[in-house]
Amino acid sequence: MITVPRGLILSLAALFSAYHVILALYSLGVPASPVPPLIAILLYAVATTMSLWPTSPARMSLWLGFFNVAVCIAVPLLVGSQLDGSVPDNGYATWYVAAVGTLMTITATRRRATLAWVGVAFLVAHTVVWAGAGALASMGVIGSVVWVVVAVMLARALAKAGRDARQYGLAEREATEWQAAQEAHLYERQVRLAQTIRLAAPMLRHIIAAGGALSEGQRQECRYLEAAIRDEIRGRRLLNEAVRREVMSARRRGATVTLLDEGGIDDLVGTDLEVVLNTLADAMAGTSASTIIARTAADGSGTAVTVVGLNSPDPRLSALGQDSDEEVDLWLEIPRAHHALGVAGATTRRH
């Protein structure tokens, strides 16, 4: 995209406006009195300077727009009061026609189109009343109106182009994010599929070789593998080699293990994640609970993972009709920060 420096545009507009001031000063001998034209020149210079101030925002302030309109009303009245409208040609003394057109063009360019129309409309009306409709062409009023029309059209076109560019940029970002999400899902599926194949392939080959005739121990091993594959889906980032090893060890001794990753540790990477997972593996290795549940904490919490270990109630007490609650063998909250791991959670036993 080709862009034009704002300073260059302001400089050209300032030079063009200064040209009108030079013409006005050059023609001061034509008006009956030079005082009103000098006041008009001063007003025009002030309005132009404020309208072209380098640090001003792109959209002109409302008060400045009204001031420009007031100047465009005052300048023709001041200069025209010292000229004879019936004269076919007042020469450069009618400099105010181009000056008003220039000031209103600047106003339109700075997104005050309505006020620009008001300014040139007064110029047209004043010229018709002061010198007649035929003077609209000879004095250059039509050219000033055309400048404003072009400025309004360009301002609207640039505004639309800016909106379209922002929309295209937003659409591009959304498309990029969607593509990244799809690539992440594809990578996740590939990782999970590779892990599943690594776990299940040896047993599947054995089943094929044995023709489906498996011993009870082998059938139980298949159940362990099925649970491990389920962990890869539901546990996701709660798994590393240490956790997988301890989960399988707990299941082999008869425990029920549930891993639930709900996205609470998606922001943990590298060493931070490994510390949390190794702490989880150590906690599972140190408990004899018959039911172990590990679950990620909510986003924004200081806790990364919560681990609960429960022991089943005593069947003898249940047979006698006595209530027996589950015993809490393990309750551990693993924090997200390294320095807090030394005081992370506590083991609670209840009988």
Image: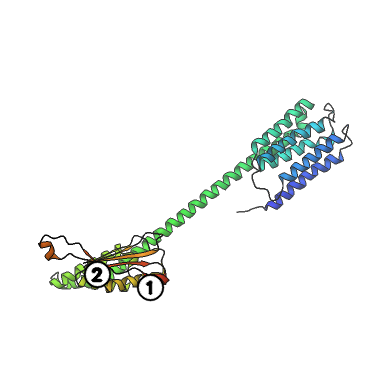
Name the amino acid, label 1: Gly
Answer with mark 2 or mark 1, whichever residue precedes in sequence. Answer: 2
Residue type at mark 2 is Ala
Q: Nearer the viewer, residue 244 or 334?
A: 334
Q: Which residue does the numbered mark 2 point to in the structure image?
A: 200
Residue in the foreground of this view, choosing between 185 and 341: 341
Residue 274 seen by the camera = no
Q: Is disc 2 surrounded by few (<14), some (14 to 19) or many (20+) residues within 10 Å?
A: some
Q: Label 1 neighbourhood size at 10 Å, few (<14), some (14-19), many (20+)?
A: few
In depth, the one of 41 and 175 nearer the eye is 41
In percent of width and height, residue 90 lies at: 84, 32
The secondary element bearing badge 1 is classed as helix
Give the residue at x 83% y 36%. 37
Taking the view exactly as shown, the residue that stands out farthest to the left is: 320
User: Where 14 sits versus 309, above or below?
Assistant: above
Where, quadrant-wise, is the C terminus in this rendering? bottom left
Instruction: Give percent across and percent down for residue 276.
Output: 36, 70
Residue in the image at 31% along x and 64% along y: 235
Q: Position of residue 203 (x, y in %)?
A: 21, 72
Q: Position of residue 210 (x, y in %)?
A: 15, 73
Residue shown at the point (10%, 62%) measured from the top left: 319
Q: In this view of the protein, can residue 73 be seen by the observer?
A: yes
With respect to residue 301, does 213 lie above or below? Answer: below
2 or 1: mark nearer the eye: 1
Quarter of the figure with residue 284: bottom left
**Residue 194, labelled with which disc?**
none
Tell whether 13 sits left or right of 234: right
Residues at marks 2 and 1, CA–CA distance in whole angstroms: 37 Å
- Residue at image mark 1: 342
At mark 2, the secondary structure is helix
Please report contact status of discs 2 and 1: CB closer than 8 Å, yes or no.
no
Query: Residue drawn at (16%, 60%), measured in percent from left and top?
Result: 323
